[in-house]
Image (cartoon, rainbow, N blue to C red):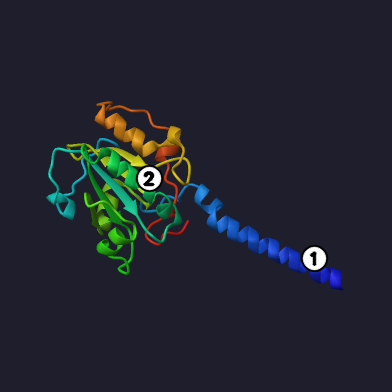
Amino acid sequence: MRKGIVIAWLILLLTAIGGFFWRSEWVYALPTPVPANYHPVAAGTKVDLSRSALAALPSGKPLFLHFFNPDCPCSRFNVPHFRDLVKRYEQQADFAMVLMTHEKYTPAGIRQRFDLPEVVTVLRDSSIAAACGVYSTPQAVILDSNCELFYRGNYNRNRYCTDEKSSYARLAMEDLLHHNFHPIFDPMALKAYGCKLPTCTQ
């Protein structure tokens, strides 16, 4: 009797541990499900930002958009990498963080909490995600100086953005700045991973 109770308890414990591991790790290793009403936006498409707060940014530079939700673990993990990209390219591109969050988070609060550089515009506007074909967080979008979609995809194969060989967003920025207008991206770079919108669950 006692042995059966111990075995049952161990099974329950292992199931709980496995469930936690799946929730915190493996679920984010799977591609984000594509929404039923998703409208793809192809590379080269001109993205209309005229009705967003980004319309006030000076033209003439590429625009790097970081789609972010602090409730998404993957988003939180890559904030240091995003700050590094800003530091590296702030003279050559404009940067904006697009909050895909509920009202409990404010742009000012996010800027302070994650110590974002002043050059980063922080705003909440879900229409920008739809215009760029974004349906998960975190996602990087790079628009060229004509506001045409150059890259939409992941930051890195590694969850913590530490693999330089698969630093997809950085490599895409380098391609654009070096006038390689027809880059060949790793398929994994273009398949969305992370938290699906708007609830930021897998």
Residue at 21% in and 49% down: 119
Quadrant of the rendered image containing residue 62: top left
Which one is in front in this view, the residue at disc 2 or the one at disc 1?
2
Q: Which residue is mark 2?
A: 81
Name the one closer to the observer, 14 or 112: 112
Which SS class for mark 1?
helix
Q: Residues within 10 Å of mark 1 (few under 14, many from 20)?
A: few
Give coordinates of residue 14: x percent, y percent. Answer: 69, 61
Give coordinates of residue 57: x percent, y percent. Answer: 14, 48
The answer to which of marks 2 and 1 sits earlier in the sequence is 1
In this rendering, would 5 be left or right of 107?
right
In this rendering, would 127 be left or right of 16?
left
Residue at 36% in and 53% down: 37
Give coordinates of residue 165: x percent, y percent. Answer: 44, 32
Q: How many marks?
A: 2
Name the one closer to the observer, 67 or 36: 67
Name the one closer to the observer, 94 or 45: 94
Residue 41 appears in view: no
Which SS class for mark 2?
helix
Q: Amino acid at mark 2?
A: His
Residue 136 appears in view: yes
* Position of the N terminus by quadrant: bottom right
Residue at 55% in and 58% down: 23
Instruction: Give the spatial CA distance, label 2 vs label 1.
Output: 45 Å
Give coordinates of residue 30: x percent, y percent. Answer: 51, 48
Q: Amino acid at mark 1?
A: Ile
**Is 95 above or below relative to 202?**
above
Instruction: Single out the residue that lies furthest toward the bottom.
Output: 1
Q: Are marks 2 and 1 in contact (CB under 8 Å)?
A: no
Q: Residues within 10 Å of mark 2 (few under 14, many from 20)?
A: some
Q: Which residue is mark 1?
A: 7
Residue 192: image tag: none
